[in-house]
Amino acid sequence: MEINLRKNPHDPSHYLHYVNLRSTITIMLQDPTVQKIVDASFLVEDSDGSILKDYTDGLVFRNSNTPPKRIDLLLFMDSCGFSDGLKSAKHKHKLHGMYITLGNLKPYQRSLLKAIRLVSFVNNDSLKNERMYHKVFERILKDLRELEDTGISYKNEIIPVRLQFIQGDNLGQATLSGMVESPTAHYFCRFCMITKAQFKEDASQDRPVFRKAEMRTPQLFEEHLRTKIATSADSVCGVKRDSPFHELAHFKVCDPRLAPCISHDLFIDGVAENDLTAMINYFIRKGWFTRDELKMRIKGFKYLETDARNKPSSDCSEAKLGGHAIQNWNLIRLLPFLIGHKVNVNNKVWKLYLLLKSVVERVCAPALARTQVNEMRVLIDKYLKKRKRLGNKYKPKSHLLSHYPDLFFLFGPLVHLWTMAFEHRHQYSKRVARMCRNFINLGSLLSSKFQLLQAYQNMGPLFPTRPVFSKSSPLQVEEYEKTYKL
């Protein structure tokens, strides 16, 4: 569905290309393999939160009075450039893509590309225009309200539908929430009321201890919004507009419902990437190894399975690690195998690296017990205090890291709500744009090609009906003992 946001038939730059949400969900629920998984999700007993394995174990979901038989939706929105980054059109052909998947699926199934469906494409400039901002979300909110009110037909029964969480990077989440987007703003955190001055004061201490500010709540958000409207200020306590998703009956951005993304907070210009870069620079200055030696070790190391597909980047420089999120994550995991034999194990910075590695292992864990989350809290506080010895500045993402133990209790394992699977979905559209080289109405081209791909993938079952094995070898019966041959 093509919607002209500007009402000018000769201007395709502000078109919204939208795929009907109810039809998308209905088609997915007709798949027998999906039905089997959804039926199993209806039978799962309510969690007591002692073991956090998915968002259904988090406090946000458990306190939402969601019925056992329901269809959960997880929404993602992010901007993506579709032209050559070296040309003048770098920002001209930049679209916001919105995708959706079923929360009833298991976490690993939600990350499969076939399970991620397109909702809309819209020009990035349309979201920057205040008049068009709410109009961009009109159609999807209309469908979401109808699904909330009337549910969806599933096996001759009407099942309620709930939008549980929205996933995205910090900029996108701030845009959807109606808060200020800049990480350098006075109120930069969308989870609490800490100010930039308080954060800088905490970071300047010899032994930094980051204070806990008042957490944002739906009531506090509404109070700040009323003050902002009454005073005509640009923003009040970081709130500059109402979120369009507050039109939904069961969704409040400060519940919270906007999940953090550990890939952006840690591995893409985040705490782990910046701090590990500073640590490697320190090790090189100590003379333990050279940068060329590290690059040779990275290239020559024997990687297996998923590590081989996401081996650390050998383009690490003095300024940054140079890889994407999974590559940087793998470098943190595998660094002891690469240069561990060259370091002084009693060195304070090396011990700080091991502490960072322990923090990353817990933050990225697919499941944790409550006691392990409390251990994570101790490790994060200890790390943020001791990283002062690195000399590089604390950034707002360091403050976000201090929220992670509490967010783990609220959202469940954060790795199940990160953006990497959805980010990977952009790759198909990038290939289409690169091969077709038609930018007149890019949203129309990408959405139509994407739906043709989905139509092709819907010709068979979404998930395999039997186990799939890789790197298997034929069974040689004669090599086994007689008792096993039977």
Image: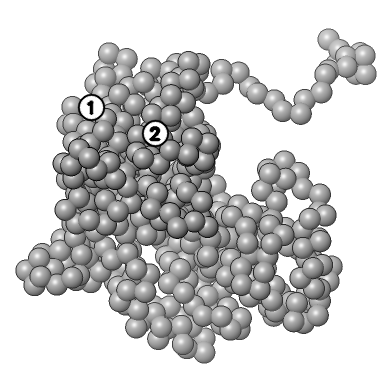
Residue indicated by mark 1: 151
Q: Earlier in the sequence, mark 2 or mark 1?
A: 1
Q: Where is residue 182 drawn, in percent x and y?
A: 34, 68
Residue type, label 1: Gly
Q: Where is residue 116 drawn, in percent x and y?
A: 44, 34
The answer, for residue 213, to whether it is visible in the render is no
What is the quadrant of residue 30 in the picture? top left
Q: Residue at x 34, y 83 (%)?
A: 197
Q: Residue at x 52, y 75 (%)?
A: 384
- In the picture, the quarter occupied by the N terminus is top left
What is the quadrant of residue 249 in the picture? top left
Q: Which mark's residue is nearer the viewer, 2 or 1?
A: 2
Q: Residue at x 38, y 43 (%)?
A: 97
Residue indicated by mark 2: 445
> Which residue occupies the extreme bottom position in the image?
206
Q: CA distance from mark 2 to mark 1?
A: 32 Å
| Element under disc 1 | loop
| Element under disc 2 | helix
Q: Residue at x 81, y 23 (%)?
A: 473
> Which residue occupies the extreme left position in the image?
230
Q: With respect to residue 437, does 212 lie above or below?
A: below
Residue type, label 2: Leu
The answer, for residue 268, to whether it is visible in the render is yes
Q: Where is residue 63 drawn, in percent x and y?
A: 29, 47
- Observer-nearest residue: 310 or 315? 315
Q: Where is residue 56 drawn, in percent x and y?
A: 39, 42
